[in-house]
Amino acid sequence: NSLYITLLEGAEGKGTIPEVLEQIAKNIDSNKLRQNQIIGVLIYPAIVIVIVTLLVLALLLFIVPNILPVIAMNQENIPPVTKALIFLSHTLKTKWLHIIFSIIFAFTICSSFLFIKWLRKYIEKLFLVMPVIGKFTIAYISLGYSMALYQSLSTTSDISSVFDNLANGSKSIIFTEEFKRIEKRIKEGI
């Protein structure tokens, strides 16, 4: 991590390497603990989504085709929802290979959008304003940056270089721009 390297370089000049290494170790432990907690919280919804998806696929691939002869007896009175189920079932059974390739293609296209800076920034903003997820994400990211800010400030007195290091170590476009804006304002004396 470039931020840790910068912290160690600053600690080397002040002779506080053991203290900084201890703070970095605490930060790494804290990050691992938070990641494990998040994974633990997200496992249950992921399992539920997978099971529901498998049940819907089983319904469309095995159950609907078996009751199709019974439904076909009375073609005039079939509700639109049942017609949609029959259509989905038929499409899945006959065009499953096309569907899989379409999903792979769509995933590839969507992931390539993350390399376009303005689109990635828009997606980040959209993600950060989502009601529950946005607040949680901001809190999680802010905690990590506040720990890094604390460690940086304890090793150097140059506040603008601290925000420069945070900007260079950030993977988020939004946070990088904000750290650069803060660094600029500090250099201007605002």
Image: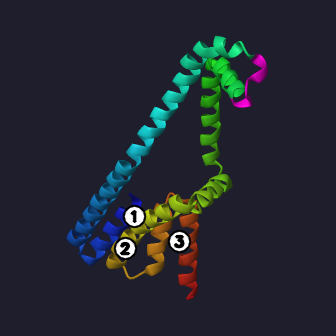
Up the image or down, 6 lies above or below 106; here it is below
Q: Amino acid at mark 1?
A: Leu
Q: Which badge, 1 or 3, comes first in the chain's sequence?
A: 1
Number of dots carrying numbers: 3
Extreme residue toward the bottom, this view: 189
Up the image or down, 74 lies above or below 132; here it is above
Question: What coloring was used for the rendering?
Answer: rainbow
Most foreground residue, 84 or 108? 84
Q: Which label number is shown at residue 152?
A: 2
Residue 52 percent across, percent down from the top left: 49, 34
Residue occupying the point 38% across, 82% down: 157
Residue 185 percent across, percent down from the top left: 57, 82
Q: Which residues are magenta?
A: 75-81
Image quadrant containing the C terminus: bottom right
Q: List the residue tagged with mark 1.
A: 3
Q: List the residue tagged with mark 3.
A: 179
SS at circle 3: helix
Residues under numbered marks 2 and 1 in contact, where contact means CB atoms less than 8 Å apart: yes
- Disc number lying in front (1 or 3): 3
Residue occupying the point 33% across, 54% down: 37
Q: Amino acid at mark 3?
A: Phe
Q: Residues within 10 Å of mark 2 (few under 14, many from 20)?
A: many
Residue occupying the point 61% across, 30% down: 103
Most foreground residue, 51 or 123? 51
